[in-house]
Image: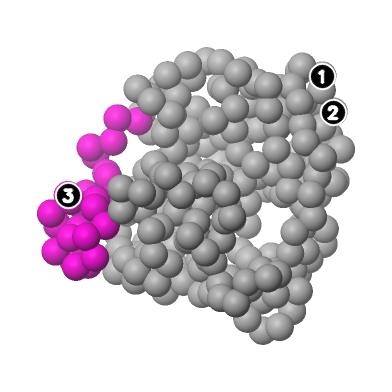
């Protein structure tokens, strides 16, 4: 099968949701770059998950299933919420795909504005470490960057089990909008990649930026091993192999 390229008209016809087109294949202006996702080494960040924000969670889940042939599963409830704000699918190699509803899951305006046009899109990505950010914080300071204080979060899975983790953000790089956020799962099991529905495989995840050389320099300073490509504007692209063929999701 070839890559799936869906126009806005075709998307609206398929879903009837009026969300607009978001999937591109050959039409993307990113230059594909092959690089293995890698396995977790103590202290070294590796890809944990990518975040696909959607205007409506259930409609987004239905569209993801229509595109890939794989149904996502509810991520469970965060403290203080009466319904789930996300849904998950495994991507292989220890990573997973998060379908995220900013309307349900965020109090601020962080990703809300990115889906105000009604179109789902990749909005961020997360890298995982297992040393409570010790190496990452050291690398950031040595490079002249700043990091916030790790903050604890958690949620209750649909089976009633509790997952706990800490998050960290880095700033002051000059290309902060291209950076991931970082997570340490604090030994919580199972990791979402282990028991979320399988069938979709991430073959490439790439960051596009007008100053790709600078992003590459920052990534190297933080020990991040992900492909960076030249693009007209900041962009993310996830290349997925699915039961329905190749799908490329972009920001």
Q: Nearer the viewer, residue 69 or 58?
A: 58
Residue at image point 61% right, 46% down: 126
Mark 3 crowd level (few <14, some 14–19, many ≥20, 10 Å Cα): some
Q: What separation in Å lies between label 1 and label 3 (alpha carbons)?
A: 45 Å
Q: Secondary structure at mark 2?
A: helix
Residue for badge 1: 142
Please indicate whether residue 7 sits to the left or right of residue 197 in the image. left
Pinpoint residue 177: horizontal percent, then vertical percent: 54, 30
Q: Is residue 227 above or below residue 97?
A: above
Q: Position of residue 36 (x, y in %)?
A: 55, 41
In the image, farthest residue toward the front: 108
Q: Identify the element where label 3 is drawn.
A: loop
- Per the rendering, the mark at residue 138 is 2
Q: Is residue 11 visible?
A: yes
Q: Is 58 located above or below residue 41 in the figure?
A: below
Residue 7 — which label? 3
- At label 2, counting other C-alpha atoms closer than 10 Å, the crowd grade (few under 14, some 14-19, many 20 or more) is few
Q: Earlier in the sequence, mark 1 or mark 3?
A: 3
103 sits left or right of 155 in the view: left
Location of residue 215 in the rendering, given as x and y in whole percent from the top left corner:
56, 22
Query: Are the residues tagged 1 and 2 within 8 Å (C-beta)?
Result: yes
Report how far apart the C-alphas of labels 1 and 2 lie in the structure. Answer: 6 Å
Residue extent of the magenta highlight: 1-30
């Amino acid at each position: 099968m070839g890559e799936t390229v869906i126009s806005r008209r075709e998307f609206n016809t398929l879903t009837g949701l009026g969300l607009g087109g978001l999937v591109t294949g050959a039409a993307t202006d990113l230059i594909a770059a092959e690089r293995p996702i890698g396995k977790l080494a103590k202290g070294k960040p590796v890809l944990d998950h990518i975040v696909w924000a959607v205007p409506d969670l259930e409609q987004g889940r239905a569209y993801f299933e229509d595109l890939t042939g794989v149904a996502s599963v509810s991520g469970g409830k965060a403290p203080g919420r009466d319904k789930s704000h996300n849904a998950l699918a495994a991507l292989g190699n220890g990573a997973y795909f998060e379908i995220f509803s900013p309307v349900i899951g965020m109090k601020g305006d962080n990703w809300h504005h990115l889906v105000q046009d009604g179109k789902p899109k990749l909005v961020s990505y997360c890298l995982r470490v297992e040393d409570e950010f010790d190496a990452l914080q050291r690398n950031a300071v040595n490079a002249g960057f700043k990091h916030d204080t790790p903050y604890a979060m958690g949620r209750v899975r649909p089976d009633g089990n509790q997952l706990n983790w800490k998050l960290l953000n880095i700033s002051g790089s000059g290309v902060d909008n291209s950076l991931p956020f970082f997570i340490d799962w604090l030994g919580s099991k199972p990791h979402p990649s282990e028991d979320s529905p399988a069938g979709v495989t991430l073959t490439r995840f790439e960051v596009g930026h007008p100053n790709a050389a600078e992003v590459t320099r920052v990534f190297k300073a933080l020990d991040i091993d992900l492909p960076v490509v030249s693009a007209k504007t900041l962009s993310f692209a996830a290349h997925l192999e699915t039961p329905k063929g190749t799908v490329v999701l972009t920001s």
